[in-house]
Amino acid sequence: KQEVTQIPAALSVPEGENLVLNCSFTDSAIYNLQWFRQDPGKGLTSLLLIQSSQREQTSGRLNASLDKSSGRSTLYIAASQPGDSATYLCAVGFGNEKLTFGTGTRLTIIP
Amino acid sequence: ETGVTQSPTHLIKTRGQQVTLRCSSQSGHNTVSWYQQALGQGPQFIFQYYREEENGRGNFPPRFSGLQFPNYSSELNVNALELDDSALYLCASSLKGPGETQYFGPGTRLLVL
């Protein structure tokens, strides 16, 4: 059974700092890994999708890496802003499109 | 905005009642998945529909059922509601095939009293 873990559960950093969020998974036979952002009480916004054959994806200030062999992914956020405050979820996908999610990291950027 | 819509946004029911939640997929998407997200947890996969047929199911009892219509809109039905069914219910649409991005709607928050 695939398990996805995100550490830490919560993180507070001053505005402007760079930060890294971690995601680990137990079964390396994944098709892809996706990072989402969730604002309080809202749905999920897809940030980055990394296919299993890729090592990283970048979008603006966000960079996600994937190491399938070690079962790890990181989401790097550069020059953090108060608007980045949200819960960040990673999810691994298999060929049947079912996503298995971690419990998320709640990020607070302090102005 | 993903183009995926859900209704209603909020709902309050009492234990034992039945509820129907609705989802309208993004245009052109033929696959819809439903997830349950309890407070403070990650979403849990309920089931997926492809071309009106169930195409995979998570660890949820039969009182959770669904439908997908020819226009690819979808319903999630829950019978005999329990207190633990209180959660945010999310639907996600995608194209069929491994590696396709799933696009999530804003969710329906269900409270069971």
Image (cartoon, coloured by chain):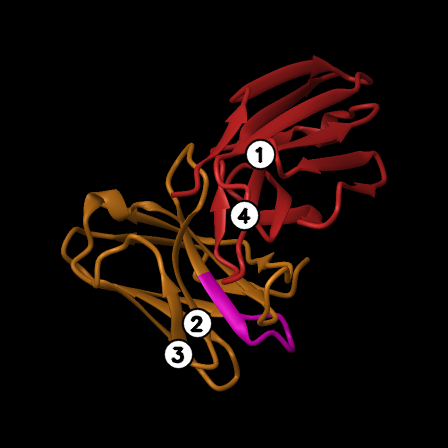
Chain colours: A red, B orange
Q: Give the residue drawn at x 66%, y 28%.
A: A85
Element at badge 3?
strand
Q: Classify 10 Å Cα crowding around label 4: few (below 14), some (14-19), many (20 and above).
A: some
Q: Is residue B46 magenta?
A: no
- Residue most toward the top? A14
The residue wearing badge 3 is B53
Of all chains, the one bearing label 2 is B
Q: CA distance from mark 1 to mark 4?
A: 9 Å
Look at the image and tell me whether residue B103 can be seen: yes
Q: Are marks 1 and 4 in contact (CB under 8 Å)?
A: no
From the image, state whether disc 4 or disc 2 is nearer to you.
Answer: 4
Tell me which corner region of the image, top left, top right, bottom left or bottom right, holds residue B25: bottom right
Q: Give the residue drawn at x 50%, y 68%.
A: B32
Image coordinates of residue A65 in percent, x first then y, are 73, 36
The residue wearing badge 2 is B49
Q: Are marks 3 and 2 in contact (CB under 8 Å)?
A: yes
Q: Give, as a three-letter code, the residue at label 4.
A: Ala
Q: Which residues are magenta?
A: B24-33
Element at badge 1?
loop
